[in-house]
Each structure stands twice: as structure tokens, then as C-alpha cells.
Amino acid sequence: MKALIQRVKRASVTIDGKLYSKINHGLLVLLGVVKGDEKINAQLLAEKLLKLRIFEDENGKMNKSLLDVNGEMLVVSQFTLCGDCKKGTRPSFDKSAPPEIANELYEYFVTQIKSANVECQTGKFAAMMDVELINDGPVTFMVEK
């Protein structure tokens, strides 16, 4: 399971020209599910992102987690994160989990975040979405479990 995370001042998802979801200060998580991923991967990744100290403390050091700053999370499914660009000029998506498994693990990941009492919004699985964000920093990390 792969997550491209961005610390944001705000972020939103628009589908067919209509606002679908939005958050304020927190994390935008683009989530890719790889073949072979299981619920334990989603659980471990959720725990990691909730506790990852990438928010600034009073001294300007990255020393606080999403939980510490009462941040919000916007989770967007992103199967292209699993794309392989090593050969040729067209990405291969052979490593991406099948849609039914990817959706199940995506939903499970979101459930894990919500169970930590974090305000969590989502995109719509397999939809064409416009994702807008104001990156805070910018601070961006790739996290895999």
C-alpha cells in the first residue's frame, strides 16, 4: 500500500463540477493499493499517518502529528501510484490491486482513520475527480506499508 501525503492548509474534491468533500488544516492522502495488500497493510499505514510527526511545534520543528494538531484528513484513491514506469514510455498497472479489493482496502483505511476520531473526508472510488489543495510548506512524503 502506498500513500503520497501532503500537509495542507485546505484541500477539496470536486466531481462533475460539484464540491464532493473538503477539509481544512491536515493531510491530503493519495492512496494506492498494490496486489497482495491486506487489511493489516491498511491498518499499519493508518497508524503511521496518524502519528507521523510532520507538523510544526512552537519552535518551527516538525515534531507534531495529525492527532497532536487536531488535523483533518482527505483520502483519495489513486491507483496510478502503483504504476510502473521503468520500461518504455507507457506506465504498467500490473502491480495495482483489482478494483474490488482496492475499494475494500480503501474503505477499511478510511474506517481506521475515523476510528481515531479524526475528521476524515474522501473522494469517490474510481471517479474522475478534480483535487485542489493549498500545500502547507510544501511538505510531501511517500509512505509505503
Image: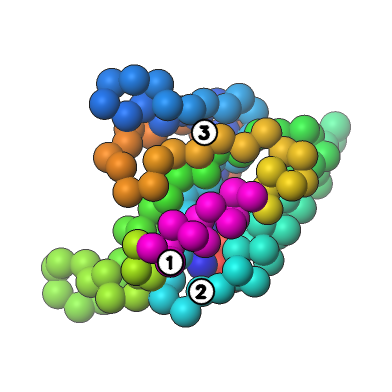
Q: Gap in Å between the C-alphas at discs 3 and 1?
A: 30 Å
Q: Position of residue 58 (x, y in %)?
A: 85, 32
Q: Of the residues shown, which amino acid type is indicated by label 2?
A: Asp
Percent x, y of residue 19: 40, 21
Name which residue lies at 74% across and 47% down. Answer: 115
Q: Which residue lies under the disc numbered 1? A: 101
Quadrant occupied by the C terminus: bottom right
Cα–Cα gap, marks 3 and 2? 29 Å
Please indicate whether residue 56 sits to the left or right of residue 84 in the image.
right
Between tags 3 and 2, which lies in front? 2
Q: According to the image, label 3 marks what residue?
A: 135
Identify the disc placed on residue 111.
Answer: none
Tag 3's secondary structure?
A: strand
Which amino acid type corresponds to the residue marked 3 in the rendered image?
Asn
Q: Is mark 2 in CB contact (under 8 Å) with mark 1?
A: yes
Determine the image quadrant of residue 96: bottom left
Residue shown at 77%/46% (left/top)? Answer: 116
Residue labelled with disc 2? 37
Sequence-first disc among 3 and 1: 1
